[in-house]
Image: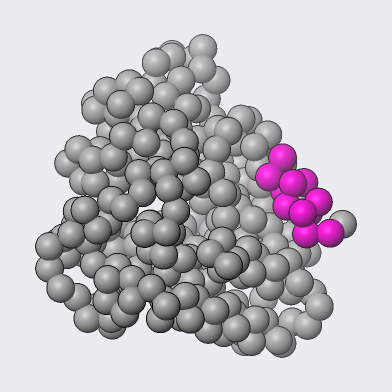
């Protein structure tokens, strides 16, 4: 398969698996389950599931194990978006090209959707498609990536930084937690879902995911000032309006574009020990950066 065919195949698998792992909309409490499905299904770039599947190809992980891991990652990611969009945080009314959950439903429902998706992620991850040892390894990776030393911690720094100046190093630290931690987990979980990778292999994948994770945020910052809301699927220009520090505000647009390309090259270099087996991971690094090419 070429990259587009592979991507479509994985995305179709993940969408079907998400439908399976989410509670049905007619199961009580039906309004909550309907809102969970509204938030998760039928939208998003699914970068984390794609990274998970691509990394799993390096260690012969089964498609079923990768589906479960990919769904867990996506549920954690979506829970963070639902909470991030609420008035107490970023107060946005559009996500993935449609009204945010608190706008479509209400704020208490949005809060519960996020809470429930966080729990449901671990239900998916501990399904019977993996043995207990694999389950434990992946549960630990996801819990660490989504907690206070990962995504939640990065969000706390982000909220505290509104209206304040950050150095480039401080901004990078924030994004390595807020965005990068879950992207790193996606790569590691994919690899750990199969044959046990060597320490050297995991170190190389960590270098790759660090570059891709930072590139993803740099590109997001660029798009926030260069793309419109219809293209983004969320409110354009909101970071600048809210006084949030970004790569564009700190180093400028041209330097941000150059940084994204350098991070793409760093990602490719990290994959050299794997040779052609890492083709999909290399193509995903291109996909992340070429959103602004």
Nearest the viewer among 231 and 116 is 231
Give the quadrant of residue 166. bottom left
* Residue at the spot 57% in from the left edge and 49% down from the top edge: 46
Question: Which contiguous range is marked in magenta?
Answer: 2-12
Secondary structure mostly seen in the magenta stretch: helix
Q: Quadrant of residue 281?
A: bottom right
- Judging depth in this view, the residue of 267 and 235 nearest the camera is 235
For residue 102, above or below residue 164: above
Residue drawn at x 43%, y 14% as measured from the top left: 30
Residue sitting at x 47%, y 41%: 230
Q: Quadrant of residue 182?
A: bottom left
**Is residue 3 shown in magenta?**
yes
> Measured from the top left, where is residue 228 in percent x and y?
43, 48
Residue ID at (30%, 29%): 102
In which quadrant will I find the N terminus? bottom right
Q: Position of residue 278 (x, y in %)?
A: 74, 74
The image shows a total of numbered marks equal to 0
Residue 4 in the figure: left or right of residue 95: right
């Amino acid at each position: 398969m070429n990259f587009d065919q592979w991507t479509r195949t994985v995305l179709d698998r993940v969408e079907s698996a998400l439908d399976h792992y989410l509670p049905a909309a007619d199961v009580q409490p039906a309004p909550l389950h309907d809102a969970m499905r509204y938030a998760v299904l039928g939208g998003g770039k699914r970068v984390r599931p794609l990274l998970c599947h691509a990394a799993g190809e390096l260690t012969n992980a089964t498609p079923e194990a990768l589906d479960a891991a990919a769904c867990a990652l996506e549920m954690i990611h979506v829970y963070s978006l639902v909470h991030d969009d609420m008035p107490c945080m970023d107060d946005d009314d559009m996500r993935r090209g449609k009204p945010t959950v608190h706008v479509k439903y209400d704020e208490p429902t949005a809060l519960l959707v996020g809470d429930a998706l966080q729990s449901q992620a671990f239900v998916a991850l501990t399904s019977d498609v993996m043995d207990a040892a694999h389950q434990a390894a992946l549960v630990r990776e996801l819990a660490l990536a989504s907690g206070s030393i990962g995504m939640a911690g990065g969000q706390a720094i982000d909220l505290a930084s509104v209206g304040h100046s950050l150095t480039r190093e401080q901004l990078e630290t924030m994004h390595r937690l807020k965005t990068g931690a879950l992207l790193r987990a996606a790569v590691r979980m994919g690899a750990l879902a199969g044959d046990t990778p060597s320490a050297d292999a995991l170190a190389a994948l960590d270098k790759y995911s660090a570059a891709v994770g930072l590139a993803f945020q740099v590109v997001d910052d660029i798009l926030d000032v260069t793309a419109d809301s219809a293209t983004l699927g969320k409110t354009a220009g909101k970071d600048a309006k809210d006084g949030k520090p970004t790569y564009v505000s700190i180093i400028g647009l041209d330097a941000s574009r150059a940084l994204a390309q350098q991070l793409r090259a760093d990602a490719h270099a990290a994959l050299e020990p794997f040779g052609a087996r890492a083709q999909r991971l290399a193509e995903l690094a291109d996909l992340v950066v070429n959103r602004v090419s």
